[in-house]
Image (cartoon, rainbow, N blue to C red):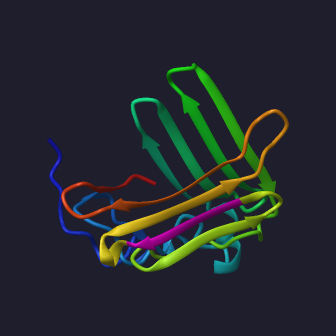
Amino acid sequence: MRELVSPPPELVTEGRFNHGSFTGPIPKLNARDAAVYPWLPMVFRGFRLKEWQAVQVGTERYFVIVALFNAKTLAVAQLKVFDKVEGTKVVYEKKLSPFAFRVPSTLTDSTLAYEGRGAKIRFGNRLKDQHVRVQFDFRPKGTSKGVSADFVIDTSPPTHQVVVQP
């Protein structure tokens, strides 16, 4: 079994990722500081960086994944709902401008959100208070009904671990 250690103060130190498995969140998510392309100016390093936040939730009947993803050339707001009893899947996906939202540099106290074009996703990251609030609302699309939820995920130990493998 891999050893869990205390998290470092930042994701990247002196140009190198802090690889490992940690007992809690890394306070500063500074992936742009990695010396992957050290000859590139800092402003251009961000174009290669893919950033996202996603949450997966399951019950006996449903499996849900909600995500905001930014690939710098395209961003996506996505919700997938799998009904395990009926054997159905509903996908709500909005392709967005890469400027539609900005991924925060911390999960200890931040918000990542998108709202527009019939979709709303909001991650209220409060790991310093040991929870993440997830809200989403997608309006009806075609023959699919709309879907919305508002729930809080308890992240108090030992329910989570952070693994860094860039």
| Quarter of the image where one finds residue 37 | bottom right
46 part of magenta stretch: no
Residue 1 location in percent, x, y?
A: 14, 41
Write the residue at 80% across / 52% down.
95
Please identify the residue farthest to the front as the structure is shown: 145
Foreground: 71 or 87?
87
Most common SS among magenta residues: strand
Residue 120 location in percent, x, y?
A: 69, 61
Foreground: 154 or 11?
154
Residue 53 location in percent, x, y?
A: 54, 59
Left or right: 110, with 2 as reference point: right
Left or right: 95, with 91 as reference point: right
Write the residue at 15% across / 52% down.
3
Residue 40 vertical placement versus 70 (above, below) = below
Foreground: 128 or 47?
128
Magenta highlight range? 120-126
| Quarter of the image where one finds residue 59 | top left
- Callout count: 0
Residue 132 vertical placement versus 62 (above, below) = below
Left or right: 144, with 123 as reference point: right
Residue 153 vertical placement versus 29 (above, below) = above
Residue 41 location in percent, x, y?
A: 67, 79
Foreground: 97 or 62?
62
Left or right: 69, with 94 as reference point: left
